[in-house]
Image (cartoon, grey):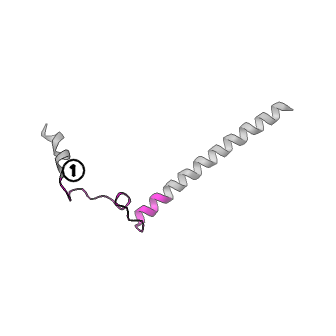
Amino acid sequence: MQAKLLPIILSLIPGMLFPCAVCYGNPEAPMTHGMNMGVLTLLGFIIFILITVAFSIFTISMRTKK
C-alpha cells in the first residue's frame, strides 16, 4: 500500500517534479528542437505513404477503365 502511495505523495510536493524542456516550454532548448524535428520526420513518412497509396489506387483505377 505504501509503495503505491509514495509516487502520488511525491508528485504533490511542489518542486519535486522537474519537467523537461519540452514540457516546461522552453522553445530555444535543443530537446524542443529535436522533438519538433522528430514530429516533422514522422509526418513526412506518413505523407509519403499516403501519397503512394493514393497513386496506387489511381493507377489501378485507370488501368481497369482501359
Q: Residues within 10 Å of mark 1 (few under 14, many from 20)?
A: few
Residue 6 highlighted magenta (yes or no): no
Drawn side of residue 18 relative to residue 63, left or right: left
In the rendered structure, does residue 31 fall within the stretch colored magenta?
yes
Span of residues in magenta: 13-36
Q: Would residue 20 be found to the left or right of residue 7 on screen?
A: right
Residue 10 x, y percent position in the rendering: 18, 50
Is label 1 in a helix, a strand or a loop? helix
Q: Which residue is mark 1?
A: 11
Please give left or right for residue 9 compared with residue 39 in the image. Answer: left
Q: Quadrant of the C terminus?
A: top right
Q: Where 50 falls versus 28 (above or below)?
A: above
Q: Residue furthest bottom?
A: 28
Residue 18: percent from the left, percent from the top? 26, 59
Measured as percent of width and height from the top left, residue 56 is found at: 72, 39
**Which residue is drawn at the image coordinates 40% and 67% (left, top)?**
29
**Residue closer to the observer: 9 or 59:** 9
Type of amino acid under label 1:
Ser
Q: Nearer the viewer, residue 63 or 26?
A: 26
Residue at image location 30% in from the left, 58% down from the top: 19
**Residue closest to the far top:** 64
The part of the image, by quadrant, that contains residue 57 is top right
Q: Quadrant of residue 51?
A: top right
Residue 14, percent from left and from top: 19, 57
